[in-house]
Amino acid sequence: MQKDSKIYVAGHRGMVGSAICRKLKSEGYDHIITRTSSELDLTQQESVSGFFQQEKPDYVFLAAAKVGGIHANNAYRGEFIYKNLMIQSNVIHSAYESGVKKLQFLGSSCIYPKFAEQPIREDSLLSGKLEPTNQPYAIAKIAGIEMCNAYRAQYGSNFISVMPTNLYGPNDNYDLKTSHVLPALIRKFHEAMITEAEEVIVWGDGSPLREFMHVDDLADACLFAMKSYNEPTHLNIGSNEEISIGDLARLIKEIVGYKGRITFDTSYPNGTPRKLMDSQRLTKMGWKPSISLTDGIKEVYKEKFLSQVV
């Protein structure tokens, strides 16, 4: 990638897209192309095709997606599969038609089977049944991987896919109905501290194991992969560390300074029992994360909530 390359970041207002933009700017890439959803509806094929023919970007980071946690994935199943299929199909096809040099498709660790062998290797894809609560979203993301591979095979397009682990960081979603577990817990404990609530209710029994990565680490890995990875196999991007939901809740409780108790509500589903990515392929290429979970949570809590306290 040259510093004057035209780089389109789809989904630049989201947590991942905005992190990629920050990383690109910090590295001296000054020709970044962005569009808001009101300026360009990525679910509309004609509009996307026209945009690519007009702008003709050299590189594309496809970070635009409809995302959410267990509740959102399960409640809005039709919306999740439709919007994600449309967005990625339109962008990938238009990138091919306009002669993009390289495209990077960002998927999700939920593409893997619910009971995949841990840590989860890239070759675990399609080896078993998916987690039912997010199956429509996962199937859409799997289709994106396969589309990149199909265009690579038939047309010779240099389209790659990366699969991030669970993410958190600036511009995260803190809506309790649609957010992922980490930002939801931060908000719950903060509000409980402010209101002096006696307890914070955590969904499930606290036993599921999860891996988390700061989105700035992901952005660094994405730029690294765009520069140096050119294989058809999708690439896992993770922190190589895991923590139980119970221990995560206790860590956030300590960081926030909440003094009440934690209650685990087992009437809610746990979701996948364990999900740790095997990121050895990326590690062997020479990349590793730099932000610890404790430091990362402290940073986002300070930025999102403590800055609002007078």
Image (cartoon, rainbow, N blue to C red):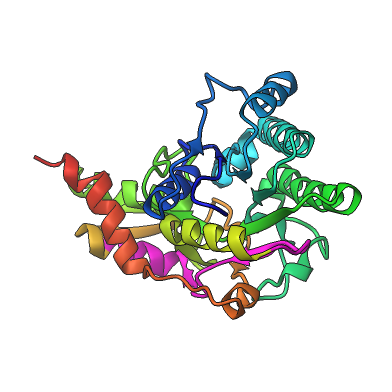
- Of all residues shown, which one is farthest toward the right? 154
Nearer to us in this view, 146 or 167: 146
Q: Residue at x 70, y 35 (%)?
A: 91
Q: Is residue 82 left or right of residue 304?
A: right
- Residues in magenta, as a range: 230-253
Q: Residue furthest left?
A: 310
Magenta stretch holds residue 248: yes
Answer with left or right where residue 188 lies relative to residue 265: left
**Can residue 198 be seen in this snapshot?**
no
- Who is closer to the viewer here, 242 or 247? 242
Quadrant where the image shows the N terminus: bottom right
User: Measuring 60% from the left and 38% from the top, which residue is drawn there?
Assistant: 65
Q: Residue at x 62, y 37 (%)?
A: 57
Q: Look at the picture and state if 127 lies above or below 134.
A: below
Q: Residue 19: where, in percent of width, then height?
A: 43, 49
Please state which of residues 148 and 263 is positioned toward the viewer in this rendering. 148
Magenta-colored stretch includes residue 29: no
Q: Toward the viewer: 180 or 6? A: 6
Q: Residue furthest bottom?
A: 284
Quarter-of-image position of residue 74: top right
| Horizontal side of residue 246 vs 53, given as left or right | left
Q: Position of residue 270 (x, y in %)?
A: 57, 58
Q: Is residue 294 visible?
A: yes
In the image, residue 164 lies at what x, y percent?
A: 58, 59
Total marks placed: 0
The residue at the point 8 percent across, 40 percent down is 310
